[in-house]
Image (tube, rainbow, N blue to C red):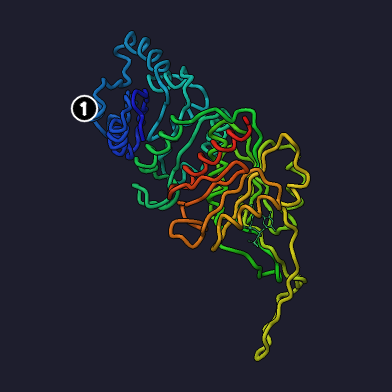
Amino acid sequence: MDMTGKEIVLGVTGGIAAYKSADLVSRLRHMGAHVHVIMTKNATEFIAPMTFQTLSNHPVSVDTFAAPEYWNVEHVALAKLADLFVVAPATANFLAKMAAGIADDMLTTTVLATKAPVLLAPAMNTGMWTAEATRQNVETLKKRGVLFIGPDSGMLACGDEGAGRMSEPAEIAGRIGEILQKKNDMAGLRVLVTAGATRERLDPVRFLSNDSSGKMGFALAEAARDRGAEVTVVKGNTTAEVTQRIRIIGIESAEDLLKAMMEEAPKQDIIIQAAAVADYRPAETAREKIKKKSGEPLVLRLEENPDVAKEIGRIKKESQTLVGFAAETNQVTEHAKEKMKKKNLDMIVANDVTKPGAGFNTDTNIATIITKDGMEEQPLQTKIQLANTILDRILFLRKG
Ligand code: CTP
């Protein structure tokens, strides 16, 4: 990832994870960023300013009331300079001060003055992270658009186990890269994405479903959100995490999906149907758990589900862009093209799920993007990368 010339202000507060931030500084510098570190007084108890000074090759601002003239000027300069403001680790105390707008040292003063996006990597004891006061502070900050990464769960320095460990520097650096590269080319667009697998009930404890993880759908939703779109996800069963600033509508079956989509679709500009929808459902759903009858085969009768994409294709408005997915195992592009036509789609993303690294439950995908104008094969890449390419092509289509 290239961060050449980007100015990152890194706040380091007083937690044991402060030592990990040294690694973060190295990573960011390797990627070409200029890093300016501000430490709280408590942070200097955990790691020496000289470490950050050496790694960042910039002077480190440390809170001291000894030189007020220095930080009066400096805090404004750094606040203005920042392309991105990161605080890692961010202690419970720092979150509380930031939420309240307290500016009693160099770091809190600078972060209050900045107009740059702010990313916080909290690190604290589980009890402090889950405390009502911290929950409310996090909520307040999120509402103001402050971004968070982590904390992760695991064994903490204090011996407790649970959420509170600072995200790994590599992960924080990755998130920083994403934020810095963020374009705003989808601002004002409403995007609806379907993600995950439907579940078709057999009885109260059993269902028919498929291997979809929802990762591709969520990658699309997050990428569109990061490019400024207003995003709604209609979500079946997924392993992908639900993330911030995305509206979620939960559904179980294909019929639920159809109902939600008929309601939501007319309000959208772009509709991307990445859900793996069951084509059939049990003809009857038993009210009680189906009992085993030894020695007898169990025959299930299935009936056809609605084709949601086709129904949405029917009510499509001229201004809307409809995108579908096609998971295939043979004659990939032929089948995909047929589906595009049948469902009145503007684009279909086809993948051969038999290829390693493609399809269900992976973090990568190999796909062919097909439109009326032609097709374009995409090499193996992460689902986030593919998501951004798909969005680029959608915007291109909408221009034409
Ligand atoms: N789709 C849908 N409703 C269904 C089945 C599929 O909305 N009942 C959507 C999917 O979300 C996807 C596209 O249609 O965007 C293609 O899905 P796929 O399962 O590949 O195609 P099918 O039409 O079901 O065809 P087949 O299973 O025969 O390959």
Q: Closer to the camera, 368 or 3?
A: 368
As helix, strand or loop, the secondary structure at mark 1 comes to helix
**Residue located at (26% from left, 33% from top):** 47
In the rendered image, residue 191, in percent from the top left (x then y), is placed at: 64, 38
- Does 351 appear above or below 372? below
- Does 227 appear above or below 340? above
- Does 309 appear above or below 54? below
In the rendered image, residue 332, in percent from the top left (x then y), is placed at: 55, 58
Q: Which residue is mark 1?
A: 54
Q: Amino acid at mark 1?
A: Thr
**Residue located at (56% from left, 52% from top):** 350
- Residue that extends furthest to the top in the rendered view of this protein: 69
Q: Closer to the camera, 28 or 121?
A: 28
User: Where the N terminus falls, by quadrant?
Assistant: top left
- Tell whether 152 sits left or right of 273: left
Residue 180 visible somewhere in the drawing: yes
**Residue located at (38% from left, 13% from top):** 77
Q: Ligand 1 lies in which image quarter?
A: bottom right
- Tell whether 277 sits left or right of 123: right
- Tell whether 29 sits left or right of 283: left
**Residue located at (46% from left, 60% from top):** 355
In the rendered image, residue 161, in percent from the top left (x then y), is placed at: 41, 53
Quarter occupied by residue 328: bottom right
